[in-house]
Amino acid sequence: MQNIKEITKRVLGGKISAVETVNEALRVIDEKNKSLGAFTAIHHEQAIQRAKEVDESISKGNQNLPLAGIPVALKDNMCLSTGTTTCGSEILRNYQAPYDCHVASLLEKSGAVIVGKTNMDEFAMGSSTETNSALTTKNPWDLERVPGGSSGGSAVAVASGMTPIALGSDTGGSIRQPAAFTGVVGLKPTYGRVSRYGLVAYGSSLDQIGPFTRSAEDAATVLSVISGKDDRDSTSVDRPVPDYANDLDQPLKGTRIGIAQEYFGEGLDEETRSAVNQAIDTLRSEGAEIVEFELRHMKYGIACYYIIATAEASSNLARYDGVHYGYRADNPDDVIDLYSKTRAEGFGSEVKRRIMLGTYALSSGYYDAYYLRAMKVRTLLRRDFEAAFEKVDVLCCPVAPTTAFKLGEKLNDPLAMYLADVYTISANLAGIPAVSIPCGFDSQNLPIGLQLMGSPFSEGKLLSVAHQYQLLTDFHTRNPE
């Protein structure tokens, strides 16, 4: 398995051209996407043209391209002026963004080549990449199982070898859970570390863009490229961006690894529990100190999250009305009928469910009882993490209660689908960084993910621990047949 550093070194050194690298990626995508459904759009001509520009830049002596010639896929809720940005929804089926999202501009500046858009749950609302209007994305480890969601297409693109990098968005686990289900690395940075400009909003206080890669080392390289202050996003934080890849060789000895029993209770699959415990033992064997502690308010996390996230979704999705842009219903009786028909025909059932839940939580007479109370619980949960990170450097736990479930298994059971995110939502509520790395396989040869969480802007520490673990194991190097 070639990592990003090796590919970039060859491109910059003239041993292979960016055009050859991108052509090979496009060939693999065309071959595998028919059965996996990872990509909703493949930008053949634009990608080759961009690769030619990278080669030309290198021929003129430009060596400051940390992702030279690297093919990258973007989740289809990130705006690109090339092609469409649909968010997996009928209401945006033919929408063409007039600008590029900030991360796309940073990727291209680094020499990367965006090759297409990947499938997702509609408006990033789901945990299986099944709630969209386009196609079904399948897990490359078992074509009868889901890849996780909502960034399932991006996870599959990396897991199946179509691209070495893909970007996703994480509102409640939408990077980490599909990374765990498909056996790749998925990083959710600290809220504000990466600009959200050009990311179609779902839950504005929760959304964050992050990378899928095959290794922690590759994730570190990508994070350094896409991080930083952006004046067009008032929530992006103005603080220096480290060279994360240069800080990976910190020894595990003396690192305090926190274990909260709230992540190991009822509902956790025994094979997942065993794999995570073995990973903890591996870290301990290298000198890490294991510290147990309590997160008292985590049990309220799911309820808190699905009030705050749906309330923000209700507000953010009010703009899709058939007037400004996107789908418009035919022959409405009046403007109210236009709004009603457009939204009824354009949104899928899960999006409608969350809009109604959020509107109810924000409505007169219920705001204090639901939304305000959820915000108070969010504060308590954040304080729990602040207290925990005074005692430990990294929190270690499972990513999901089970491995990948079967296609259709939970599609008609919203509560069961929501509970698939029970271990991931707390990081979004607290705004802290978290990463999923492969830590084993179950008896059906399905990947299991280990989640590492840290204090705000401690991505360097998280990636260092992940990298040291990957030097001791080979789970991240294994490929689906």
Image (spheres, rainbow, N blue to C red):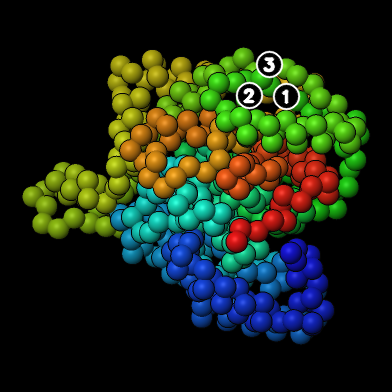
Is the residue marked by circle 1 packed among few (<14), some (14-19), or many (20+) residues within 10 Å? many
Instruction: Identify the residue at horizontal 42%, vertical 27% (top origin).
Output: 307
Instruction: Identify the residue at horizontal 76%, vertical 70% (top origin).
Output: 8
Q: What amino acid is found at the position of numbered circle 2 in the picture?
A: Phe
Please identify the quadrant where the C terminus is shown.
Answer: bottom right
* Residue 376 against residue 401 in the figure, above or below: above
Q: What amino acid is found at the position of numbered circle 3 in the picture?
A: Glu
| Label placed on residue 201 | none
The residue to which callout 2 is attached is: 264
**Front of the two marks 1 and 2:** 2
Is the residue marked by circle 3 packed among few (<14), some (14-19), or many (20+) residues within 10 Å? some
Q: Please state which of residues 164 and 351 is positioned toward the viewer in this rendering.
A: 164
SS class of the residue under badge 2?
A: helix
The residue to which callout 3 is attached is: 294
Determine the CA span between mark 1 and mark 2.
Answer: 9 Å
SS class of the residue under badge 3?
A: loop
| Label placed on residue 259 | 1
Contact flag, marks 1 and 2 (Cβ < 8 Å): yes
Please identify the quadrant where the N terminus is shown.
Answer: bottom right
Is the residue marked by circle 2 packed among few (<14), some (14-19), or many (20+) residues within 10 Å? some
Q: Please state which of residues 144 and 257 is positioned toward the viewer in this rendering.
A: 144
